[in-house]
Each structure stands twice: as C-alpha cells, then as structure tokens.
Amino acid sequence: MATTLSEAYRDLPLNLHHIIPLDFSSLRTLPDSHAWPQSDDDHHHFSFNGCYDGVESFIPIIDLMDPNAMELIGLACEKWGAFQLKNHGIPLSVIEEVQVEAKKLFALPAEQKLKGLRSAGGATGYGRARISPFFTKYMWHEGFTIMGSPSDDAKKIWPNDYERFCDIMENYQKQLKMLAEKLTHMIFNLLGISDEEKKWIGSTNHCGAVQLNFYPCCPEPNRAMGLAPHTDTSLLTILHQSQTSGLQIFKEGVGWVPVHPDPNALVVNTGDIMHIISNSRFRCALHRVTVNNTKQRYSVAYFYGPPVDYVVSPLVLNSVPRFRALTVKEYISIKAKNLGGALSLISTHLKTN
C-alpha cells in the first residue's frame, strides 16, 4: 500500500513518449507536435487588460501581517481560488537560491538532463508535465519534480557535485511546508474545521512536492502552450514565478486573467482537495501558462496536501455534502485517468437527463 506521494504515482505509470521533452535549444521553428489548434483551449489568444465592465479584476494581493488576513484569504479563495501573498516570511535569499539552481539545471545540455529522466512509473526527476497525456499536443515546457530528497535524481545529473542543489531544494521544501501549514490552519479555522480533522497538519507524512518549471523562448508563442489548463490536485499550491509574465487564471464571466509577477509575493492557489473539503465553497483555480519569443520563464511550485491515506470529504457541512469521501490516493488515481472530470466523478449531485 502506498504511504508516500511518490509511491501513489508509481501505480500510475506514463508512457515514455509522455515523459521526454524536446531539446528546445536546437529548434528554430515550432514543430507540429507543439502547435496547438486555434480552436483548442477556449480561445487560446484571449487577451485581457485587467478591466471588465469598468471594474479592475486582478487576483487579490494579501499581506499575511494584515489583522484581517484570514478573512481576506477566505474571500480570495471563494472568488478566485488564488491570491498573491506578501510578508509571507520566506527570505528572498532562499527563493533566489532556488531560482539560480533551477536555471543551472535547465541550462544543461539535453543529454545531461536526460540522465535524470523520470521512469515511466516514477514521479520525480526530469520530464514533461504529468498532464501531457490528456492533450493532443505537447507543451513548451520542461520540468523537474522533487518529493523529499532529490539526491537520487540529482546524482544522476551531477555525480560529483549534487550536494548544493539538494541542500537548497530541501531547505526550500522545509520553509514552504511551514508556510503551507500556517495558511492551512488559518483557512481551516475560517471554515470552522474541528481540531480532530486538523491533526495531520504538521505531520511528516503529509503530501509535499516541489516542481521546477522552465518555459524556453518560443519561435511562435501564439501557436504554443506553456502549460495547458488544469487544476491542481493539492490542498494548496504556493508558487514563485520569475519576473516574466505567463501565468493566467480563468475567472468565469471574465476569461483568462494574467497574474503579474511581483518579486515580493508568492502566488497561492487552492486545489481540488481544498475544493472538496470546503464543500465547493472555495474554488480550485483553473490555470495555464503562456509563452513568449523573447524571454525565458522560470517558476517553482510547492504542492501541499494531507497524507495519501487521509480520507478527504466535505468538512463544511452548511449544506448537503457535494462529494463522496475517499482517500487522497484514490483521488490521485481518479485524476490521473480523468484530469478535468475527476471532481464530477466523485460528485454526489443527483444526475438527471
């Protein structure tokens, strides 16, 4: 039985052609494999200037030191499923170190990066986005996934010089875990969730992962996709993005809204597990990443959630439960086969013809 996040994914292998990225450095034109049809993805070229019906519509920026931070976070989760967080307590030096190591990693020759290629049944290491099999075209993206210590994968890439990379990534996970725990306590308190249901917070067997993302310059950015639209499985995702735009969040009635980079802020979004626990009160943010032809883009995402054997169910019972109870591992398995349809498959709503 799976006891860790990486073990949960081991039961859900991908085909190798869904794992190996292109050698983007060798390309001068967009290959057909990465050319997205114009009809795909709900008007891929939608542009948004931050104003809708005369009202500015940007995701909220919240100061964690604000006395009303808990209530503001709750409102942001209800309306957007996302917010930018300032005064979050993560030193800028820690974030910058991670960025430096990520840039070094992705700048390596393709043959060296491929030494750390994740296996078909693996969840960590170098490769394409795990959501790749759900789309007919590939994404303009390289990733490196870390769950716990990255040493096994890092040793393959840097046999004699992997310690610094590992130390920096492990420190980042430790710092982000503490921030995620703080935010989870605040949100659960706001939702009125019992102490019994909060006991797993702070445990060592939580689900945590770091995802390093690289979006190279693209020769035809209007026909390519950096990361296709999806929601995260996690309870919370905490993202640091480089000072290059690309991340967008979908808001009903508005469209794709850009999340403008702020060097002092982290982007927080709620995932499917938070949506289930809040009984649909909090959104799970549908998001995507676009690319450009002049600037490379980097981001680092930290995914946080309960242990794989934790039973997830609606804990906010202000109305009829909208989802059936299931373990985190069961939900990961359902999502690995259905992606955008996973939540509807566990919905308790009566379906009528």
Image (cartoon, rainbow, N blue to C red):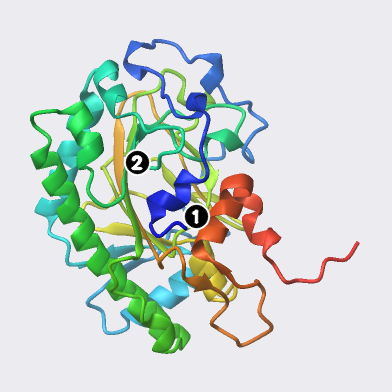
| Element type at mark 1 | strand
Residue at the (56%, 15%) spot, across then down: 32
Amino acid at pointer 2: Thr
Tell me, yes or no, whether the two marked residues, 1 and 2, touch with CB atoms within 8 Å: no
Q: Which residue is mark 2?
A: 124
| Structural distance between the alpha carbons of marks 1 and 2 | 40 Å
Residue at the (52%, 22%) spot, across then down: 34
In the picture provided, is 28 more to the left or to the right than 168? right
Residue at the (34%, 80%) spot, across then down: 186
**Figure check: 166 above or below 297:** below
**In the foreground, 2 or 258:** 2
**Figure check: 324 above or below 156:** below
Q: Which residue is mark 1?
A: 51
Labels 1, 2: front one: 2
User: Could you say where residue 224 lies in the image, as x and y percent from the top left?
Assistant: 50, 27
In the picture provided, is 165 more to the left or to the right than 213? left
Q: Quadrant of residue 69?
A: bottom left
**In the foreground, 328 or 259:** 328
Amino acid at pointer 1: Cys
| Element type at mark 2 | loop
Q: Is residue 287 visible?
A: yes
User: Could you say where residue 2 lies in the image, as x and y percent from the top left?
Assistant: 44, 56
Q: Quadrant of the C terminus?
A: bottom right
| Chain-order first, disc 1 or disc 2 | 1
**Figure check: 211 above or below 349:** above
In the picture provided, is 172 more to the left or to the right than 25? left
**Figure check: 342 above or below 348:** above
Count every numbered label the image shows and give the total: 2
Q: Quadrant of residue 304?
A: bottom left
Near mark 2 (Cα within 10 A), the count class, few <14, some 14-19 or many ≥20, is many
User: Could you say where residue 183 lies in the image, as x and y percent from the top left?
Assistant: 32, 73
Q: Quadrant of residue 146?
A: top left
